[in-house]
Image (cartoon, rainbow, N blue to C red):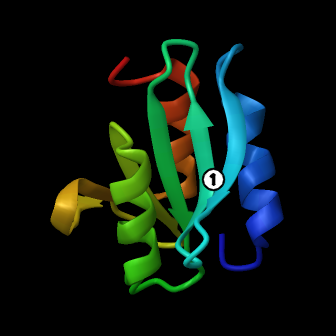
Amino acid sequence: MRRLTLRRVIERLLGVAPAGVVPSFYRSGAGAEIDLLLTWPTGEHWAIEIKRSTAPKVEQGFHSACADIQPSRKWLVYPGAEAYPMRDGIEAMPLQVAMQTLAVGAGK
C-alpha cells in the first residue's frame, strides 16, 4: 500500500464491497473526518481511516467523527503486515485484510 493514494485504496475497498453498501465521506463542521464511511443496507456504519505510515496513529478528528456517527466497526488501514487492535475499538489492518473482511461482510 506504500505507493497507493487514498483514492486508490478507497477504489480497492469499494471494488470488493457487497452490493447495497453505500460509500461516503464524513466531515463535521469542526473539521473531524472519516476517510471512508460505509453504510450497510441495515443502516449500520463502518468508519475507515487510511494511513500511509507503517506506524500509524489515529488523529483526534477521527475519534470525534466516530463519536458523531457511532459506527459499529472502526478500521485503520495501513501498509503494514499485521492486523492488531488499537484503543477505542479501532482495528488496524493491512489493505488486503480489509478487502477480504469487507468482501464477506464479516461481523454482519
- In the picture, the quarter occupied by the C terminus is top left
- In the picture, the quarter occupied by the N terminus is bottom right
Q: Mark 1 is on which residue type?
A: Leu
Would you identify the image quadrant in which residue 87 lies? bottom left
Q: Residue furthest front?
A: 29
Q: x%, y% of residue 55?
A: 39, 86
Q: What residue is disc 1 on?
A: 36
- Tell me the residue at 39%/24% (across/down): 106
Q: x%, y% of residue 54?
A: 46, 83
Q: x%, y% of residue 39?
A: 58, 30
| Vertical order, 52 against 68 (above or below) | below
The answer to whether residue 93 is visible is: no
- Tell me the residue at 33%/23% (across/down): 107
Q: Residues within 10 Å of mark 1 (few under 14, many from 20)?
A: many
The answer to whether residue 24 is visible is: yes
- Tell me the residue at 69%/15% (across/down): 20
Q: What SS does tag 1 mark?
A: strand
